[in-house]
Amino acid sequence: MRRQKKNAFWIALAAPGIIWLIVLFIVPFYAVLAIAMGKLDQLFESPVAVWNPFAWSSENLIDVWRDLFGSAAFAGPILLRTVVYVAIASLLSLAIGYPAAYFVARFAGRRKGLFLVLMVAPFWISYMMRMLAWVDLLQTDGYANKALSWFGISAVNWLGGKPVTVILGLVYGYIPYLILVLYAGLDRIDPALIEAGRDLGLGRVRTFMRITLPLSRQPILTGLLITVLPMLGDYYTNNLLSGAASTSMIGNLIQGQLGTPGLEGQGAVLSMLLLLVLLIPMIYYVIATNRSSQAAS
Amino acid sequence: MAHPREGWQGHGAPRKLTRRSFLGRSAGAALALGSLPLLDACASALAGTGSVPLPRPDNPVKWPVFTGNEAIKTGMPREEGATLQVYNWVAYVNQDVVNSFAKKYKCKVEVTTFNTMDEALSKLRSGLQFDVLMGATVDVLGQLIESKLVQPLNHSYVPNITQAWSDFTNPFYDQGWQYTVPYTIYTTGISWRKDLVHENPYTMSNPWAMPWQPKYKGRVAILDDYREGISLGLMKNGIFNLNTTDYRQINAARQALQDLTSLVNVRIDNNDYTEVPTGDTWIHHAWSGDMAAAASYMPKGVNVDVVGYWFPADGRGPVANDTNVVLRSATNPVLAHEYLNYFLDLPNVIENISFNGYMQPLTGVTPQVLVKEQILPPSLLSTIVLPSYFRRGVAELQLPVDVDALWQQAWLVVSNGI
């Protein structure tokens, strides 16, 4: 009886979260699915959601499949470009973020709080505002080019559709997420383990390679997951910092389809496919976390 | 003159082909036969969605007035203490003019904005209620009228229509101005920085090809609009039917734009009004109304004279107008009519143009007035739209659904840099 009451208490406690999930995730998800498998209003060229799964049409799905992999596929290269941009941006984020997080976790001492505040500070400003600030900084007569001119370097057309600008924009936009996750993971590493390594005769580098790095594998995985997922669906970094067709990403394609009368259904399918692709690293993450927990216990 | 009802089909007529199968079959047939079939069969019927006619200058349309959606009666009293709900594009009206209307008619006016016509249509269809829709484009009038989202006008409440150009008292897209009054007018041309670009489009043999110059790589942009974009490709290729249904022409335009990406890494955006003045872009496919406002965006110390806007001197280029309509859901229809009337009165129109740069087709809005009122710098007189442009110019009008899909698909490929 007491056990039943206890269970009911926990269910009641979880209820708001579950209701929240149903209302704000499952219902919208099903709405997207109903549009993806739905029809087209002939008068307005707008999508008509079909809620009954038995009446679903596969037309949009087939169209998107052809766009991605058919003989006249045009979306395939965009997908490839997106993967390349995100991979480079993620690796750069890791290369920049890991040392920063490592420093704060291991060497910041009493100033740890200050550094944490500095790391969280970018979250106080919206992503779009930060990108718009970069537009000002990077324009022809912006501060970036003025700074270059001090060294005799001629002005660079940063906003002229350069992949490097988009990639660096992605790095700048998402790196705080990575650093915070890495910091949380690195801070939890028991210093005694590192000291033990040093006591057993390992140098600084080998201690890092044999103890710290293996123990930070899980935070790295989590951090990358948290940054890669939004990067893959990002569209406004490219919109604001490039705007060139040659740097368009899959998010831009989806945005284009969703904003084009008659193509919203295909945009919905592409969104669903992207979600399915993103599920792969998420499932891997869950498995890896479980394995790690089991190994620890 | 053709009867406006020509080309109409029964409501809800079943479609014989899906959009994609139509595309596939057109392309397939073309490959098989060695020459692509003109899709003019679609256009000849001038039926867009199977039930809505496609207005054309040579096929003007008089829209029906549906039972239960008639115009309001003459002589009705104005709604007292009302709040007029206006639905408009972002930054497409001078708030000072809106406020002066509210003051004069002792009412409140709330302006809600949208970003695309598609968004506006979706929200109106979802049941959002407004009194006035400002800036309705000509290509969606059929949809608005057919779905009874707008109400016919009672002309007795809009006496200021006499101030408008005569072309707009009987436009081909709404014979007898039953549902619409004109709002803004604009051309699409090429804007460039005279101090950074050596060529002058006025002396070029094909100014529409001006963006195709590799030496300006990274400094060229085109408008982010599938009709404007593909139309630029068409005109570069010497095609001036901007409602073409010919697959070959659309395909060639797409290829031209893809070549443009390869040549100059073209940017696709609608920031012509800021990018050219700041010098971030040197050649921009542009709208006249945007460039008319260039002076407001010039960096400190740079004179607006360095900004140029080219539109064919003979008027043979894209020209368009937006309209204002009273929505059927209007709870203040009399006030809504008076609002439309207010935006056809010269002093208000001049003040409105001073904010958004887009001209309105009133006989009193002349180049001399715009320069005298310091709304337009003399160096940008080319942004002025003349009545003759609507006779000689080319308009991007509503396309048959399946042909529209061809244009959209071509643009998706261009805008994603394939």
Image (cartoon, coloured by chain):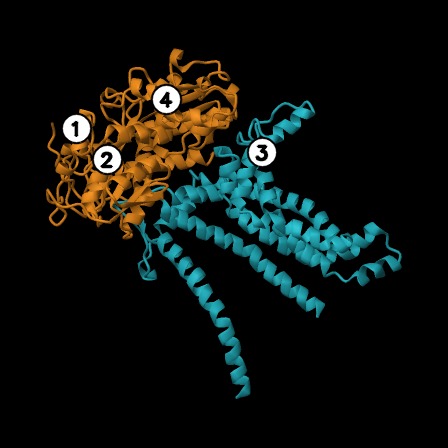
Chain colours: A cyan, B orange
First in residue order: circle 4 vs circle 1: 1
| Foreground residue among B298 and B102 | B102
Amino acid found under the numbered disc labelled 3: Leu
Instruction: Assign a secondary structure to mark 3.
Output: helix
Q: Position of residue B32 (x, y in %)?
A: 32, 32
Question: CA–CA distance between discs 4 and 1?
Answer: 25 Å
Give the residue number, with chain letter if any, for mark 2.
B342
Q: Do pointers 1 and 3 mark residues of a single chain?
A: no
- What separation in Å lies between label 4 and label 3 (alpha carbons)? 32 Å
| Residue labelled with disc 1 | B162
Question: Does residue A25 lie above or below B229 as drawn?
Answer: below
| Label 3 Cα neighbours within 10 Å, binned few <14 / some 14-19 / many ≥20 | some
Closer-to-camera residue (A294/B325):
B325
* Circle number at residue B374: 4
Disc 4 versus disc 3: nearer the observer? 4
Q: Secondary structure at mark 2?
A: helix
Q: Residue at x 36, y 34 (%)?
A: B226
The answer to whether the residues at label 4 and label 1 have Cβ atoms under 8 Å apart is no
- Residue type indicated by callout 4: Gln
Q: Residues within 10 Å of mark 1 (few under 14, many from 20)?
A: some
- In this view of the protein, can residue B192 be seen by the observer? yes
List the residue tagged with mark 3.
A137
Discs 3 and 2 lie in a common subunit: no
- Residue, far top: B203
Q: Position of residue B162 (x, y in %)?
A: 16, 28
Same chain? Circles 4 and 2: yes
Tag 4, which secondary structure? loop
Measured Cα–Cα span from mark 4 to mark 2: 22 Å
- Could you classify mark 4 by the number of other residues whose Cα lies within 10 Å: few (under 14), some (14-19), or many (20 or more)? few
Q: Which mark is on residue B291? A: none
Q: Which amino acid lies under the numbered mark 1 shown in the image of this protein?
A: Thr
